[in-house]
Amino acid sequence: MVISLFPARDNGSPASSPASIRCCTANMRLCFEHARIVAARKAVNASLAQQWLACQAARIKLDSDSIHLLFPHQEVAMSDQALQGSCLCKAVRYEVKPPFMRFGHCYCSRCRKATGGVRSTNIAVAPDQFRWTQGEDLISRFDLPEAKSFARQICKRCNCPVPHRSRDGQRFIVPAGTLDDEPTTKPAGHGHWSSRVSWVSVDESHLPTSD
Ligand SMILES: [Zn+2]
Ligand SMILES: [Zn+2]
C-alpha cells in the first residue's frame, strides 16, 4: 500500500523537525518501518529517525520513493563518529558507525537465555557500518537450530556476548551493553513485550511496546 505523507509545513517549507512530520494514518507519529527505511537510506541522521520510532504502524508498507517526500532537502548524515565496543576481557574489539537501523529492547525468552537477564538491548546496523578491530579469531558462533534467525556470538576467552552478523547477511546485531562509547540515541521500543517475565519492571513506559 502506498501512502501519502505530509512533506511540508503549511507555509510550504520543508518539514525538518520531528513534530512537524506525521504519518498520514490517523496522524500517528512516524512509524518504525518508515524510520527504519529512512535510517537505512541515510536520508536523515539516526537520532532524528529514532525519535519517531514510536508509532506501532510498522505493518504499513511504504513505497520507497515516498520516503523522499519526507526530507526533500536533507542531506545524508553520516557524520556520527564510529563507536568503539569490546568484550569483557577486551580481547575482542569492534567499531560500529551510526545511523542505526534499529536500537531496542527485546523481552523474548531466547534473549533472556542469551543474556541471562530480563531483556536484550541490541543495535542493528548495515554490514558496511561495522568492523572488527581486534580478536575476531577468538569469536565462537551459535545459530539456534529451531530459530529462523536467532544467533549469538561470544568471545571464547571471557564468554562475553559480542556482535554477530545476521544469517541473511543483511545486518550486524550489536549487544548495546558491549559498547564502550555512548551512542547519541536511545532505545526506541520494547520488543516482545508480552513475553516478559512477571518480575520485570522498567521505568521506560514512554516507549512503545510490540510483540
Ligand atoms: Zn573476551
Ligand atoms: Zn529477543
Image (cartoon, rainbow, N blue to C red):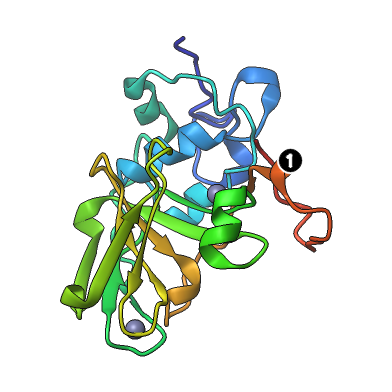
Q: Which residue of the protein is positioned furthest toward the top in this rendering? A: 1
Q: Is residue 134 visible?
A: yes
Q: Secondary structure at mark 1?
A: helix
Q: Specify whether residue 13 is in view.
A: no
Left/right of residue 87 with respect to residue 51 in the rendered view:
left
Provide residue 105's location: percent of width, then percent of height. 59, 55
Q: Residue at x 83, y 60 (%)?
A: 199
Q: Residue furthest front?
A: 145
- Residue at mark 1: C-beta within 8 A of ligand 2: no
Q: Left or right: 211 with respect to 162?
A: right
* Residue type at the position of mark 1: Ser
Please state, as top left, top right, bottom left or bottom right, where the C terminus lies in the image: top right
Left or right, residue 170 beside residue 146: left
**Residue 96 image position (x, y, % from top left):** 30, 67
Q: Nearer the viewer, residue 161 or 39?
A: 161
Q: Residue at x 26, y 39 (%)?
A: 168
Taking 118 as reference, is 91 left or right?
A: left
Relative vertical location of residue 172 with respect to residue 59 in this rendering, above or below: below
Nearer to us in this view, 170 or 80: 170
Extreme residue toward the bottom, this view: 89
User: Residue 50: x, y in percent?
Assistant: 52, 50
Residue found 39% across the figure and 35% down from its top: 148
Q: Residue placed at 56% from the left, 30% from the top?
A: 11
Residue that badge 1 annotates:
194
Q: Residues within 10 Å of mark 1 (few under 14, many from 20)?
A: few
Q: Image height check: is 186 above or below 57?
A: below
Q: Nearer the viewer, residue 172 or 96?
A: 172
